[in-house]
Amino acid sequence: MGMIENMRLGRYGIWTFDFEDQPAGLIRDSVRELEELGWPSIWIPESQGREALTHAGFLLAATERLTVVNGIARIWAREAQWTRGAALLLADAYPDRHLLGLGIGAGKPGTKPLQAMNDYLDALDDGQSVNPAPRAPMRRLLAAYGPKMLALARDRSAGAHTYHVTPEHTAQAREILGTEPFLGVEHAVLFETDAAKAREIARAHLHPYLTSEYNVAKFRRLGYTEADLDGGRGSDRLVDDLVFWGDLDTITTKLGSHLEAGADHVGVQVIGVEPGTSAMPHWRRLTEALLPA
């Protein structure tokens, strides 16, 4: 399986939405503690609260060793020349610590995702730039699920990032990518042992994904039926597959199944945290179970 040369990503990292709506001081304290705990990498989305590249730059400036991965920066949010300029600056300022994850996100009406990504990468690779060469390479991943986008990730980036998938999909993705490209897989976890409570929280988390056309298509490709989708509610089987809930041992064992299926890295997303509070207590528990001593 492939890794990205000179980058410190580890087998497990933190994947979080938490910083989308937190003040800068709390974010700074959190990432510094994660670094001290020994976490090698953190993945951040571009959802509704933070712009991807300034967010990454802030986290890099607040830490000394942590690798920051955009999971993902949306290609519709900025033209390729500005993405290139920002990523080159981060690669130069923080060598081997920034990984640019690019993705379609929710998509754009009237566009073909594969063509749109190809065109964006063409523009990103345009050699006409006033930016100086960085001290370390600017590296990128693509958000990819279907065979064609995974092949594009293999051919035109360092690898692929997947989100809300099963270990079975991880095995399929590894087969398409081959041995060299990097495969980073996100998975949601929930520290709740009561099945009814766990599934209620998991369903609330999954509802936006179970009601968006792009994600529904992905779940169908994974073999889930209309009964599993259940009008956006999600069957017990689907919910249990996409959110690993239970005690620490149960959760960590299930996370390991992605590595066994061919992932290089798992970004662990803790859900079920009350708004305005920190997931840090759960991240501390995961530290002891997932990181090397």
Image (cartoon, rainbow, N blue to C red):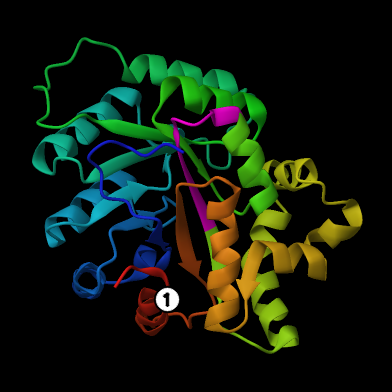
- The residue at which mark 1 appears reads as 289
Residue 106 belongs to magenta span: no
Residue for point 24% across, 30% down: 138
Q: Is residue 116 above or below residue 255?
A: above
Chain part drawn in magenta: 176-186
179 on left or right of 218: left
Nearer to the camera, 66 or 108: 66
Locate residue 73 relative to residue 164 in the image: left or right: left
Quarter-wise, where is residue 206 in the image? bottom right
Residue 151 is situated, as x and y percent measured from the top left of the image, at 56, 24
Q: Amino acid at mark 1?
A: Ala
Q: Quadrant of the C terminus?
A: bottom left
- Left/right of residue 257 with respect to residue 60 in the rendered view: right
Q: Residue at x 66, y 55 (%)?
A: 209
Residue 150 picture location, percent across and down: 57, 30
Q: Is residue 146 above or below residue 249?
A: above
